[in-house]
Amino acid sequence: MKKIFIASFVLLLIAMGVFVVYYFVNQEEDVQEDIELVSPRKDSIIKKTVATGSIVPLKEVTVKPAVSGIVDKIFFEAGQTVKVGDVIAKIKVIPNMTNLTNVQNNLEQAKLTLDMREREMKRQKQLFEDGVIAEREYMLAKDDYDLAKNQVNAAAESLVIVREGTSSRSSSTLTLVKATTSGIILDVPIKEGANVIESNTFNEGTTIATIADLSDMIFEGKVDEAEVGKLKKGMDLVLTIGAIDNEKFDAKLDFIAPKGIEEEGAIKFPIKADVELKENQFVRAGYSANADIVLERKDDVIVIEEAWLQSADKNKEKNNKSDKKEENKIDSTKTETKDSNQKSDAFYVEVQTSENVFEKRYLTLGLSDGINIEVLKGLKVGDKIKKPN
């Protein structure tokens, strides 16, 4: 019975040994099969940041009435083109009763003064003709009469303006709202019959229409405080407009705000850029857009993916030394890695030197766009790199 037990134990040990050998052989094959080789390439590296905003006209003007009243007629609507001087709307004046009463009282008082000055002038004229007074006294009375006559005409003119919004001395009519610039009408926010308030020192007035030149557009957006220090006037922007598919628009950075504003817990700085529209290219005002701001660019440089890099920190070096003892136990068919003395940065790649033999190559790195990175020293096009698992 004892012999049977010993024989069974020996068979079990042999089976376990076969399993262990089989396991390590398969592990070697898996390691060998998992190796993937990649190569550097010549490409462009563009480091950029993104600003969100909208496309707006550089010159946008609001047209307001010069008198208060009711909109009697509107001659244009949104989307139509106007020129300077075109009549957009006509206002029907509704006189203010207080102003009307004051003007009427001024006119009556001016007429009474005129009658008094006229009688005085006639009396002085008779005395002068009789030789009682000097000519100078008669001329003073005549001047007073002329002045009173002008005051009556001015009061009468004021009454016409208050009642009708027009003046006989001016070729322009205050009741006609005219375009002050050429362009396209973006909006006419009022309707016929609506009450409007005149624009004056104390009130900005009711907007009759908004006019803009859509051939001269700008991009208005905001950038994060972490990126604003990298921006400079004259930088190139590439605009992507959500409403226009498969088309890019070039722009030049023209303005960077000196003061940021808080938005959703972050500080952002407004920017503006001149949009370079092509001939017959039309962009509507208010389109939302994203701007790619090119911070730095390098063309025709050696590029690899950042994911191919391996860090050469101290902890990894310690782990590598402890792992070498186990690597030496594996058959010579397994990948071999030997250190290079060309350490110029904290990252390296493993470059194939011969069949299944790789060299640890330290790299000098340059510009990165977050996915790809420039290699200044350590690699050339055609090198075979072991891609990390």
Image: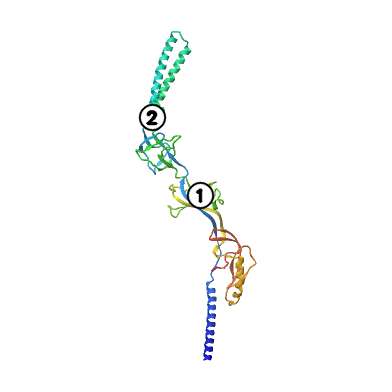
* Residue to which mark 2 is pinned: 98
- Please give the count of numbered marks on the rendered protein: 2
| SS assignment at label 2 | helix
Of marks 1 and 2, which one's residue comes earlier in the chain? 2
Residue 290 appears in the picture as rendered: yes
Q: Which residue is mark 1?
A: 262
Specify whether residue 355 is in view: no
- Figure check: 206 above or below 162: below
Q: How is the image coloured?
A: rainbow
Left-right relation of 5 to 82:
right
Q: Mark 1 falls on what kind of element?
A: strand
Q: Around disc 2, counting alpha carbons within 10 Å, would you say few (fewer than 14), some (14 to 19), or many (20 or more)?
A: few
- Depth check: give the residue in front, 71 or 75: 71
* Residue occupying image coordinates x 38% and y 29%: 98
Tell me which amino acid carries mark 2.
Thr
Q: Residue extending furthest front?
A: 1
Q: Position of residue 374 (x, y in %)?
A: 57, 60
Residue 380 x %, y %: 59, 64
Q: Image quadrant of residue 129?
A: top left
Within 10 Å of the Cα at label 1, are there few (<14), some (14-19), or many (20+) other Cα atoms?
few
Image quadrant assignment for residue 21: bottom right
Q: Position of residue 16 (x, y in %)?
A: 53, 82
Determine which of the numbered discs, if any, sits on residue 42 in the image. none
| Amino acid tagged 1 | Glu
Question: Cα distance, mark 1 to mark 2?
Answer: 48 Å
